[in-house]
Image (spheres, rainbow, N blue to C red):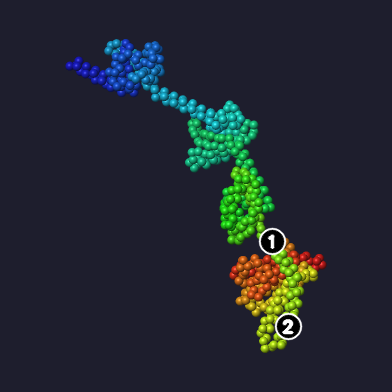
Amino acid sequence: MEIVGVGEQLRQSEERYQHLVHMLPDGLLVYSEGAIVFANHAFLGIVGASSLEEIITLPIKNFIHFDYWEPFAATINYLIRETNPTNSVYYKLHDMNQGTVEVELRAVSVKFDGKPAVQLIVHDVSDQKRMEASLQEKDYLYKSLMENVVAGVFVGHKNNIVYANPYLSEMFGYSEEELFKLSTYDLVSEEECNKVKAVVLDGMERGMDHFALKFKGIKKDGSFIYLEGNSSIIMFNGQPCLLGTVQDVTFKEEKERLLRDNAKLYQKMIKFVPEPIVLTDEGIILYVNKLAMQIIGINDDAEVIGKSAFDFFHDTHRDTLKETMQSIMSSDEATPFQERVIIRPDGQLMDVELSSIRINNYMGKDVMLSVLRDLTDRKRSEEILIRSEKLSAIGQLAAGVAHEIRNPLTALKGFTQLLSAKYPEQPHYFTIMSNEIDRITLIVNEFMTLAKPHFSQFHNEPLEPILQSVISILETQAILLNVELKVHYDQSHPMVYCNVDQLKQVFLNIIKNAIEAMPEGGEVSLSVTTMKDGYVHIRIKDGGPGIPEDLIKKIGEPFVTTKEKGTGLGIMISTRIIEAHKGTLQLSSAINEGTVVEITLPIQELPPSLG
């Protein structure tokens, strides 16, 4: 019974041993006399066998890589003699499909079925070797990328450079050995370094992973290099470091600086050119100088910058302007001046002439420069010239016919009086005839005034007494029509070189017209202001119904009038008198707002004895 118990214990012990052997993570192989006698599950997996029966009794040589078979016996003997069983050697095996398996072997001498045998512990290192090879390959790849990338790459720790690729060294003009001996401050000024640190720290506080770099470096020869790129924080040798990649943008920086300098030069030139200038890009306003702002009618360029230039031109010109702009941008020639009408922000229309040319490389782009010229004065001068020519023609006509008309008028006047006395029972008809003859006589006399104005008696006279005498004459008529005359003089008391009677005639005509424009009553304001340009400005405004725009342009022409019985010669004569006094007379009017007459006369200096 005891023998049976011992046998059972041995059997159970063997089963436990085999179970433990099969559970080993490393392969276990036993061979005796060159043939395999045992293998655990791990070894079967290494060589790709499904069961022990597939490999049992097979020669061990079948599984040894042919490059390693020759030294195999010597290697095993060496391992067996070693007292330390942990020693292992690198080997290659064949699997069941003749594939290569990389392993590490340890060997011990054992007994199997009473025969000498060798037990091999086989550790599969194929994955490890593949990983090491992959790491080596990646390390080579990364190193190759860093050393051949067309950008400067560096790793900085505190104020030292712990890595720099050859491209960065070349950018700064140093060899790699020289570069690693330098501190950061040798390559970048302390001020620039502090800027970079501020950007990085600010980005880190905001949770950013990457930070833009832009700084100025110092090359070996002392010249500056401008660099731009990106950076991030990495761990290097257990320390946080700054990894950065930068590009040399010195050429770009210098080009941008040149563009900025050119733009400033352009702006300075444009600013001080004594012409109204507007710069546009595809019709969008980029810049206007002060003279152009005055023409457009704005005080701040922000009112037009960024807006379409076409919005400021009359609709009739917009299509032709677009065609002209396309032509300008494809040529280097300036356009001839062409008349246009612009619309000011207050709705006022203004006649201008416009010439444009292409400007290359303004802030890096081609733009259009336009020169504006205000035609208001020219148009006014043309109107004055035309009016003067009309006056001259009328004067010549009057000189030729007035004398011939006067003699018949005298006869008609006399015979009308005789007939009126002879036929007293019909006074109405003779009264009409007499009044009409007087009207013809008045017109002839006004024509004679145009033909031969008497301006010979000119003297320096104070202006206020002349105006005051006219106002005194018209005050009674104003009271009768319920019109209030408001007069304002400044404190300068100007003197004018004039013919007093002729000036009185002018002021009498104009103030009388203003009073008669308000038959229902109203207010006539008269102001006298001395200007800094050496002229006195007389402004007379009524509150009448105003004059239509199409008619006001013709006021001053013969027989153009708003009065039922007017001749239209009063304004014409007044204009000629004022022009003879080296002054100007202008009318403006708005419907339901009244009419304004503005007269300017040159001021005469007081004699020293009166000053």
Q: Is residue 496 left or right of residue 25?
A: right
Q: Amino acid at mark 2?
A: Phe
Q: Residue at x 59, y 53 (%)?
A: 320
- Which of pointers 1 and 2 indicates the residue nearer the eye? 2
Q: Residue at x 60, y 45 (%)?
A: 330
Q: Is residue 611 left or right of residue 564?
A: right
| Residue 310 visible, this angle | no
Residue 606 or residue 498, whichever sits in front:
498
The residue singled out by tag 2 in the image is 415
**Considering the numbered disc 1 on the image, is that residue within a helix, a strand or a loop?**
helix
Residue 490's place in the image compared with 311, above or below, is below
x and y percentages locating residue 527 in the rendered image: 68, 69
Callout 2 environment at 10 Å: few (<14), some (14 to 19), or many (20+)?
few
x and y percentages locating residue 97 in the rendered image: 34, 20
Q: Is residue 210 left or right of residue 579?
A: left
Residue 30 or residue 589, whichever sits in front:
589
Q: Residue at x 64, y 33 (%)?
A: 222
Residue 510 or residue 199, whichever sits in front:
510
Q: Amino acid at mark 1?
A: Glu
The answer to which of marks 1 and 2 sits earlier in the sequence is 1
Q: Is residue 328 left or right of residue 231?
A: right
The residue singled out by tag 1 in the image is 382
Callout 1 environment at 10 Å: few (<14), some (14 to 19), or many (20+)?
few
Q: CA distance from mark 1 to mark 2?
A: 47 Å
Q: Residue furthest bottom?
A: 425
Residue 239's place in the image compared with 327, above or below, is above
Quarter assignment of residue 302 = bottom right
